[in-house]
Amino acid sequence: GIQVEQSPPDLILQEGANSTLRCNFSDSVNNLQWFHQNPWGQLINLFYIPSGTKQNGRLSATTVATERYSLLYISSSQTTDSGVYFCAVIKWGGGNKLTFGTGTQLKVEL
Amino acid sequence: EAEVAQSPRYKITEKSQAVAFWCDPISGHATLYWYRQILGQGPELLVQFQDESVVDDSQLPKDRFSAERLKGVDSTLKIQPAELGDSAMYLCASSKTGTSGGRRYQETQYFGPGTRLLVL
């Protein structure tokens, strides 16, 4: 099956700092989503981005499908950004199921 | 904004007991998913429904797990008997079904708050 790897696995930031999270996948995909899992376990949709660039406030994402990676940018980080960030992909013909990456654990400190 | 509902939020049970989880997807979402997330890992699909039909249950431990979506709306996931290794977060998600070039595909998946299960 498709492999999804994220880096870095852990990240500690000071409030106000910027960061880039990376997601690499082993095969071509039809869909890609970024999620934030908060400390209470809720998975929150950030982006549905099979290709191209999208922005939502302090967050933006870019997927380069031909090179099999996606990037999530967090600017001016806040303590509420803490949690785990997952990317997940779908490859049609693979059951249309989301395959999740390994996650990036982010902690934003004051 | 419509949300996926799940209950209970937390469940503690003893091994060999039966447990059941309930999920109500976003209205109009034909596809419903149950995922299991072990601490420190990403969620993994257990079962996927399209309306009332199962389309993927290849990762569901069928000797002890069962899932149903009788009317194609809400769904129940059951474990009987529960084992220590079943302790995890159980997440439900739903999505609309789109079509592109005559092919059906799943749009954005939205997740519920999850049920944390602890088996003692």
Image (cartoon, rainbow, N blue to C red):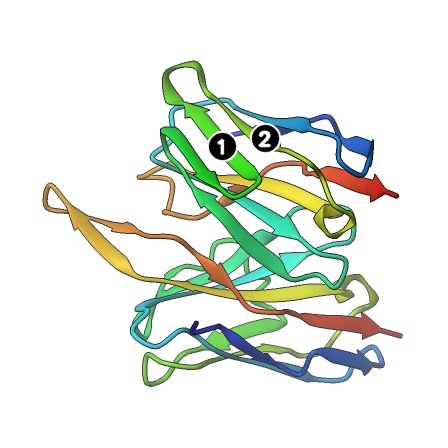
The secondary structure type at the circle numbered 2 is strand
Q: Do the residues labelled 1 and 2 touch (CB within 8 Å)?
A: yes
Classed neighbour count for the residue bearing mark 1: other residues with Cα under 10 Å, few (<14), some (14–19), many (≥20):
many
Image coords of residue B92 (percent x, y) = 53, 67
Q: Which mark is residue A79?
A: none
Q: Residue at the spot x=79%, y=61% of the render?
A: B85
Q: Which mark is residue A73?
A: 2
The secondary structure type at the circle numbered 1 is strand
Label tally: 2
| Residue lying farthest to the left in this orientation | B102
Task: Name the quadrant of the N terminus of chain B.
Answer: bottom left
Q: Image height check: is A58 above or below B65?
A: above
Q: Which amino acid does label 2 sit on?
A: Tyr
Q: How far apart are marks 1 and 2 (CA)?
A: 6 Å
Image coords of residue A78 (percent x, y) = 74, 45
Q: Which amino acid does label 1 sit on?
A: Ala
Sooner in the amino-acid sequence: mark 1 or mark 2: 1
* Nearer to me, A11 or A3: A11
State which quadrant residue B28 falls in: bottom left
Image coords of residue B34 (percent x, y) = 52, 64
Q: Residue at the spot x=73%, y=52% of the render?
A: A80
Left or right: where A9 falls relative to B22: right
Q: Name the residue under label 1.
A: A61
